[in-house]
């Protein structure tokens, strides 16, 4: 049940207790409970303005929870309210949650704009991991930007971001929570240099060890890791990825993201495109456009392999058009070229 502001004798302590509960529930993958914690804390501050602490930006925790339960429309409303209230809020508080939001929805120009909107991020302070100042904020923001630049074919800009990030030691818990997009971009670079084992190793710990970064969603890159493991024909790695996918799907409460990842991994392992289509339908419904594009590409390959060219063509076409909508024309063309070679599947423009 929620916490009533009128019943609280020490609202500052109550906000801190609720924030601590948010972290605990996030680590336990109980996303509905975490969402209730942050909503209660925000309600307390709204009713007792004297409770407000400029270091405790609860709205970035709210954004994090909304993304976990796939409420992207609500998260967009939080962003809009933040922009409308810029005169009374520090823009640095929301630049990371906003950039993350636009990354998953495929609004990559807005993502890069959010990244560039804060010229002095180290002037801000916050209790929230996702907008922690200094190294962790840069790991997230520049990591996102690096991977977007890679998929857009701007490898020079991507390398510039990565060179900056490689100066940051990933040692403490904040850096471990923040490094996932940086590691994903490094894995992309290594994969395209032909070093699949090193690419797998980059994401191995953060994806397969649930204790490495407890607040992260380690299942995000499991389909990618599985594809690398299959390309290396490494059954041990395949088994470890599948074990992780099953573990995350089993322990996650109130979010279907881990289950969709399990469907994708099962699709790749069983060579069953219909499981990928099931995940794609969910991503389409909730507005996770990047994962939709990824999953449709996986489905297209499996359809082509199973001699189902019409379905392969439809999946490939939608995936390519999505990537083009992200501004990732280079990756769209690369994807089209790779998939066109499978059983003579041809691309058909949606226009």
Image (cartoon, helix red, strand yellow):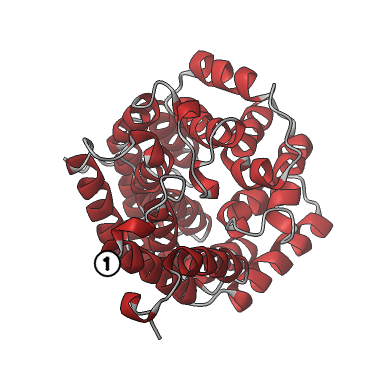
Q: Is residue 123 above or below residue 56?
A: above
Residue at 24 percent of width and 40 percent of height: 88
- Which quadrant would residue 195 be assigned to in this image? top right
Residue at 37 percent of width and 47 percent of height: 101
User: Where's residue 43, x and y in %?
Assistant: 31, 68
Residue at 59 percent of width and 73 percent of height: 249
User: Where's residue 152, x and y in %?
Assistant: 42, 26
Q: Nearer the viewer, residue 16 or 250?
A: 16
- Which quadrant would residue 241 be assigned to in this image? bottom right
Q: Is residue 76 left or right of residue 116?
A: left
User: Where's residue 189, x and y in %?
Assistant: 63, 27
Q: Quadrant of the N terminus?
A: bottom left
Residue most extreme to the front: 9
Q: Is residue 287 above or below residue 156?
A: below
Q: Is residue 315 above or below residue 263?
A: above
Does residue 237 appear anywhere in the picture?
Answer: yes
Q: Nearer the viewer, residue 20 or 245?
A: 20
Q: Nearer the viewer, residue 255 or 310?
A: 255
Q: Nearer the viewer, residue 192 or 273?
A: 192
Q: Which residue is mark 1?
A: 47
Q: Quadrant of the C terminus?
A: top left
Q: Is residue 317 above or below residue 90?
A: below
Q: Is residue 197 left or right of residue 227?
A: right
Does residue 347 appear anywhere in the picture?
Answer: no
């Amino acid at each position: 049940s929620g916490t009533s502001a009128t019943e609280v004798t020490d609202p500052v302590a109550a906000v801190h207790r609720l924030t601590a509960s948010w972290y605990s529930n996030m680590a336990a993958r109980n996303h509905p409970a975490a969402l209730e914690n942050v909503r209660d804390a925000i309600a307390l501050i709204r009713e007792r303005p004297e409770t407000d602490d400029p270091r405790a930006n609860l709205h970035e925790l709210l954004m994090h929870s909304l993304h976990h339960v796939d409420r992207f429309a609500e998260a967009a409303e939080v962003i809009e309210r933040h922009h409308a209230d810029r005169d009374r809020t520090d823009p640095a508080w929301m630049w990371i949650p906003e950039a993350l939001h636009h990354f998953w929805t495929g609004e990559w120009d807005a993502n890069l704009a959010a990244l560039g909107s804060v010229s002095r991020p180290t002037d801000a302070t916050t209790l929230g991991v996702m907008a922690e100042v200094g190294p962790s904020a840069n790991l997230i923001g520049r990591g996102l930007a690096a991977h977007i630049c890679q998929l857009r074919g701007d490898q020079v800009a991507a390398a510039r971001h990565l060179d900056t990030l490689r100066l940051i030691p990933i040692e403490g818990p904040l850096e471990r929570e923040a490094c996932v997009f940086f590691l994903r971009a490094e894995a992309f670079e290594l994969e395209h240099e032909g070093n699949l084992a090193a690419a797998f190793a980059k994401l191995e710990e953060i994806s397969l060890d649930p204790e490495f970064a407890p607040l992260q969603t380690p299942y995000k890159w499991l389909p990618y890791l599985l594809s690398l493991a299959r390309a290396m024909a490494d059954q041990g790695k395949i088994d470890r990825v599948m074990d992780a996918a099953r573990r995350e799907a089993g322990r996650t409460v109130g979010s279907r993201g881990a289950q969709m990842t399990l469907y994708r991994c099962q699709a790749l392992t069983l060579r069953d495109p219909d499981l990928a289509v099931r995940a794609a339908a969910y991503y389409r419904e909730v507005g996770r456009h990047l994962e939709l594009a990824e999953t449709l590409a996986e489905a297209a390959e499996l359809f082509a392999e199973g001699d189902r060219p019409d379905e392969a063509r439809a999946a490939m076409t939608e995936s390519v058009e999505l990537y083009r909508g992200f501004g990732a024309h280079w990756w769209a063309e690369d994807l089209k070229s790779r998939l066109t070679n499978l059983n003579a599947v041809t691309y058909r423009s949606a226009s």
